[in-house]
Image (cartoon, rainbow, N blue to C red):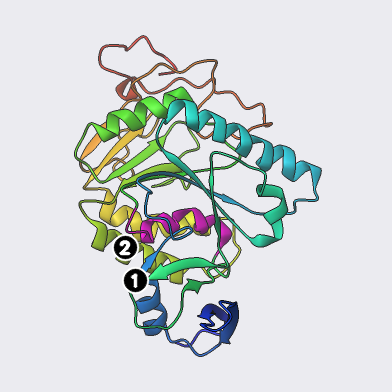
Amino acid sequence: MNHSLLLKVIFTILSASSFMIIVFTAISSDFSSKELKILLSSNITCDGSRDSDNIISFSLFGDWKDSKWKSRFFRPMKKNILLAKRFYPGWEVRIYYHPNIQHVVAGLSNVRLCNVMALPFAGTDLPASHIDLSWINPRVWRFLPLLDDYVSVFLSRDSDSIILKREVSAVEEWLNFNRSFHVMRDHPQHGAAILAGMWGARLDKRRKEIREAAVDMVLSSQDDLKSTDQRQLEYRIWPIAKSDSVVHDSYFCKNHRLRSRDITLPFPTRRENYTFVGNVVNMSEYLFEECPEECRPVEHKEWYFC
């Protein structure tokens, strides 16, 4: 299958005489699936840095001129950067973005910015230094740390959902287990196998297998549908995750399709103020439906909303 998606590979040529950097963009429409797979199987980083370890990853895209976009996505993103510094000390926040919002994100601090049109890569025989992955669904950009060999632990989060201490406690509990994947479901409507902004992965044990699944996911995400990220997670990641995962689940803990074949647990902390992990900001949504008794902690069956 040939791709006509105008994959851009940026070649950087150093002129020895003038020390001038000349950037030449080669646009190709005849990359085969095999060639693209080889390319995506290389080490694709955010900005070439090797000091990454634990990553909290976000996609940020949309119409920056729209005031609703700023209140729905950008302002919560800024708050999440501060919360990540507080709740996840030593972790790196990454924002994968298109350069059309470069001037918006340029002023952010305590964050690593990843331009999806120029992601550094290494490990192939191609005479190139960067790859343009802006053609994949922007909701999938945040999964690209799965292709970065310098990342050890990866969390995928939504830019319009605020980080809660409840989430952090669940992540800490997951990391105490020797399991590769973490999945959270904290609402009666969280009936997906993996929610795109509520999961994570440890890459050290199964890096090759996870990379292969991530490559397939990227190559299958050439659209702009809102459902693509979760559909790809269900088809590509859940099959390898469900037997090697910790799932924190408040409502579907006994659902055979959704429960982990490994470890399914209640959230370790009690719900506060009727909110939930993954709650979209500015939606004023609160949770008043009791959790099934079997999904509450054994020692706290009185936590009706778990």
Q: Where is residue 185 in the image (x, y as percent from the top left)?
A: 42, 35
Reading the image, the residue beneath label 2 is 211
Q: Residue at the location (46% across, 79% down)? A: 128
Reading the image, the residue beneath label 1 is 41
Is 41 drawn above or below residue 69 in the view shown? Answer: below
Is 136 drawn above or below residue 15 in the view shown? Answer: above
Q: Where is residue 198 in the image (x, y as percent from the top left)?
A: 44, 40
Q: Position of residue 217 (x, y in %)?
A: 41, 65
Q: Residue at the location (35% across, 70% down)? A: 42
The span shown in magenta is 137-150
Instruction: Tell me if I can see residue 87 in this picture.
Output: yes
Is 48 drawn above or below residue 276 in the view shown? Answer: below
* Kind of residue at disc 2: Arg
The magenta stretch spans residue 115:
no
Q: Is 114 placed left or right of 291 in the picture?
A: right
Q: Is mark 2 on a helix, strand or loop?
A: helix
* Kind of residue at disc 1: Ser
Q: Where is residue 176 in the image (x, y as percent from the top left)?
A: 23, 31
